[in-house]
Amino acid sequence: MQTLSARARPRLEGATPVPAGETLFESLRSSLVRFSRLVQSLEAEGHTGYLALITDQAQGLVFFRDGRRMEAVYEGGVVSRGKAALEVIAQDVEAGKGVLDAVALPGVLVDVLPGLWLGKPLYQELRASWVDINGLLSFLHQRGTRGSMLVRSATATGVILLLGSDDVWAYTSNRTEPVHGSSLVADLCSDPRASIEVRSAAPIPASEDGIASIRLELAPLPD
């Protein structure tokens, strides 16, 4: 693990949490990086996982599968995706904003993670006080749903990744290492005011900018 940041790590309140994994580097100051070369290096190394930019105002993520850029997301007030998201991330890095993490994850998790931001909403604005979380998970398993469940409670935000079978992974903003099973996040539903949202894994089709929803065809990145 490499750390080249003497400053406090930025923290974006309310950001959608991402899972921990094998850390290639952490808290690398963006002012020390040429973004295009970093991305090209991760591609050449066959990276599977994500590259994250964290600032006090935004979170930018580039998802890789076997060295291919699969999707990019920029969460800062509103969510942008694809080429637009990648360009904003590159601009923030060029301006020396925030820090960068590179994390390796199993490919099955990378396949569903972008859907946390971009997947089609299946159920929204559910409340733990009137939802049987285990019953809902059982229903989703029976339907073979691939996607994610996001639970926001007063104490933490939790994510359950649905792989289309009984095998699910879960993590929270407090415990980011993903574990098998749903109990870690289901426990957050003891807060009756916790909100629950379910999204599909498949991203919503890209808008009229012509960017493919999965494999992005991007112009050369700025240095």
Image (tube, rainbow, N blue to C red):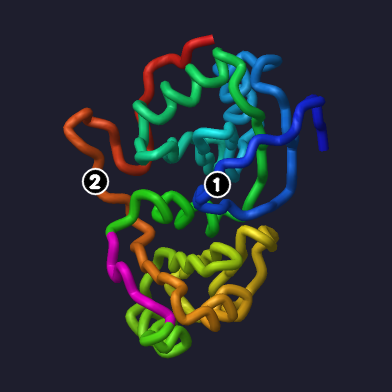
Q: Nearer the viewer, residue 33 or 39?
A: 33
Q: Residue at x 32, y 69 (%)?
A: 125
What residue would you read off at disc 2?
205
Q: Residues within 10 Å of mark 1 (few under 14, many from 20)?
A: few
Element carrying mark 1: loop
Q: Is residue 94 magenta?
A: no
Q: Is residue 103 above or below residue 89?
A: below
The range drawn in magenta is 121-128
Amino acid under disc 2: Pro
- The mark found on residue 103 in the picture is none
Q: Is residue 72 visible?
A: no
Tell me the distance, in whole angstroms, between the alpha carbons under discs 1 and 2. Answer: 28 Å
User: How far across and how far down the image is residue 111, in percent?
Assistant: 47, 54
Q: Is residue 8 above or below residue 154?
A: above
What residue would you read off at disc 1?
13
Q: Is residue 125 magenta?
A: yes
Q: Nearer the viewer, mark 1 or mark 2?
A: 1
- Which quarter of the picture shows residue 24? top right
User: How far across and how far down the image is residue 101, in percent?
Assistant: 67, 36
Q: Residue at x 40, y 30 (%)?
A: 85
